[in-house]
Image: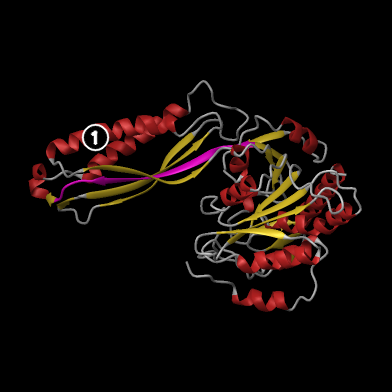
Amino acid sequence: MTSTTNNNSDVQIKAITSYPNNSIDWLTRLIAFDTVSRYSNLALIEDVQAYCAQLGLSVDLTFNESKDKANLFVTIPAGENADIVTGGLVLSGHTDVVPVDGQAWTSDPFTATIRGSRLYGRGACDMKGFIACALTMLPDAVALSKSGQLRRPLHLALSFDEEVGCLGAPLILADLAARNITPDYCIVGEPTNMTMVVAHKGIAVYRCRVHGKSAHSSLTPQGVNAISYASRLVGFVDTLAEQLTHRDDNDPLFDVPYSTLSVGTIQGGTATNIVPNLCEFTFDYRNLPHMTQDDILVPIQAKVAELTAQMQARAPETGIELQQQESVPAMTDDDSAELQHLIAALVTDDKRHKVAYATEGGQFTDAGIPTIICGPGSIEQAHKADEYVELSELERCDNFLAQLLERCR
């Protein structure tokens, strides 16, 4: 992948001779970096790295294979010049944003614009707003550390490629494991209107390729219709999806209380008078935390085997492939009771929420780090044209992080 940055952002950022001291100015700065997932995020990461260096902090970077994207992990240690860097609390956010292609924006999506009580720009809520608040709080954390008043380490983790499969966070976690750093807790700052999300579903995406045998449509017995067999499998997936809604172990605390399964895309065939030899479709599974991919994969694989046998009885070269394209684990609330108790004292709504969308939080809980999600902005504004965050949400997040820092003293 070629490293690409926003041409305008270079000019805007270089014009700033000092770093911001408030979350609005930090968010303005972060939005100016075009970190759409298909581009590099290195300009943003290097800017934050320089800011950390100015504060006397050293960062650890982990890169993707092509070295055009990086994660950043930085620790404010417990106490002045202390070697205590394990344990503590991680503030986690992703630096990439979704594309703006085809969206009708009222203003430049990569120039932060305040209209009324809202700040508009790509990533304003998802999720550069949280990162801006965390960076604003960083000097206070450093001051506490240098004065010996920080009882536990505070970490900041910034990842790449969350929007395209949560690809960056596993590299951060692997690096921490290699360095024997095990944080006690993690807060992922995805937009929740500053409420507490304690669990979310996992996601798995599969592509199914049905290979048939072409023939003239007047000679259908000589062919194997890939679309017809694909439609039988799609019908089976739909039946399985309906069965998921009636399970006894569904969880009413989730906004969608059952695991879901849905076909998303399908394509096949070349002409009406040709028996198609290929049909492809994708499907998406979003599982409750106590369920696994095997709950749907095992019956689907059994159906694939049954249909493949029928196809190969007519033409041995035919068959069905099932390929996994994406997998993000669910986030559980099994071990986060202590963290939930802490967060409940810091937010105005202490209700525990569970959601259907996936985040990097599942990867942190999979690594044994109790995690909750709490951040400024609404998920309903994410990925849309004229994405925005309420200025009052940034203020609430600033206050939340200030109180959280007090708990680390």
Reading the image, the residue beneath label 1 is 307
Closer-to-camera residue (217/355)? 355
Question: Which stretch appears magenta?
Answer: 199-214
- Tell me residue 330's x, y (percent): 56, 37
Numbered circles on residues, count: 1
Residue at 46% x, 28% y: name it: 244
Is 65 within the magenta? no
The way the protein has been coloured in the rendering is secondary structure
Left or right: residue 213 versus residue 32 is left
- Tell me residue 18's x, y (percent): 80, 72
The residue sitting at the top extreme is 248
Name the element at disc 1: helix
- Tell me residue 373's x, y (percent): 68, 43
Overall secondary structure of the magenta stretch?
Answer: strand
> Dividing the picture into quarters, in which one does residue 239 lie?
top left
Left or right: residue 332 versus residue 394 is left
Q: Is residue 398 visible?
A: yes
Q: Is residue 109 visible?
A: no
User: Can you say whether 41 is above or below 314 in the image?
Assistant: below
Q: Amino acid at mark 1?
A: Leu
> Dividing the picture into quarters, in which one does residue 47 lie?
bottom right
Q: Residues within 10 Å of mark 1 (few under 14, many from 20)?
A: some
User: Can you say whether 189 is above or below 200 in the image?
Assistant: below
- Tell me residue 10's x, y (percent): 65, 76
User: Can you say whether 351 is above or below 223 in the image?
Assistant: above
